[in-house]
Amino acid sequence: MKILTSLEQIKHLNHPETVKGALMAECLTPFGSFDAAEHFWHDYQTQLFAFMPEDNIELVLENVTYLTDSFEYSEFITHLADNWYLALVITTQAGGGNYLLFQGGVHSALDKLLESYKYNGEHYEP
């Protein structure tokens, strides 16, 4: 898992280009420009927790037990590409928060986020 604090770091992820492109587009949508998004991320300590394709999910989740709990009531979960999803949880009054980039179908705790959101929030696109 990598923790990103800047949108510039997305290009260094080793995910498929389709996933990185969709991820960047989704992160820029609320802001309209890369610079505006970068300033917001910096000013409001926004982070992206990115599961990597090669991660041992079980091991990562053992070391960050709070992670799935903190995303249980996500503002949204959206399908990006190639079975990868992006979840957002707001943590500040100004709208800052944390994103989670994860792959569906690889661990029950992550699939539970999708199911919980399906029933408690907007319907995600599988």
Image (tube, rainbow, N blue to C red):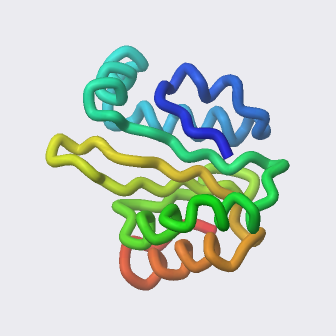
Q: Position of residue 20 (x, y in %)?
A: 66, 35
Q: Is residue 67 left or right of residue 74?
A: right
The residue located at (28%, 42%) in the rendering is 96
Given residues 29 and 37, the one toward you in this image is 37
Residue in the image at 37% along x and 81% along y: 120
- As drawn, the residue found furthest toward the left would be 93
- Counting from the top left corner in percent of width and height, residue 21 is at 64, 33
* Residue in the foreground of this view, choosing between 73 and 57: 57
User: With 2 as the anchor, is 8 left or right in this view?
Assistant: left
Instruction: Say which quarter of the image contains residue 103.
Output: bottom right
How many numbered discs, if any?
0
Among the 4 quarters of the image, the one containing residue 110? bottom right
Q: Position of residue 46 (x, y in %)?
A: 37, 37
Considering only vertical position in the picture, is 14 above or below 85?
Answer: above
Which residue is located at x 62 percent, y 76 percent?
109
From the viewer's perspective, is residue 104 above or below residue 44?
below
Query: Relative to 99, does residue 15 appear above or below in the rendering?
Result: above
Q: Quadrant of the C terminus?
A: bottom right
Q: Could you say which is closer to the camera, residue 125 or residue 8?
A: 8
Furthest toward the right, the residue is 54
* Residue at x 37% of width, y 70% of height: 73
Horizontal arrangement in the rendering, residue 11 relative to residue 14 (left or right):
left
Q: Position of residue 47 (x, y in %)?
A: 44, 39
The single residue placed furthest to the front in the displayed view is 63
Residue 91 shown left or right of residue 122 in the figure: left
Which residue reaches farthest bottom? Answer: 119
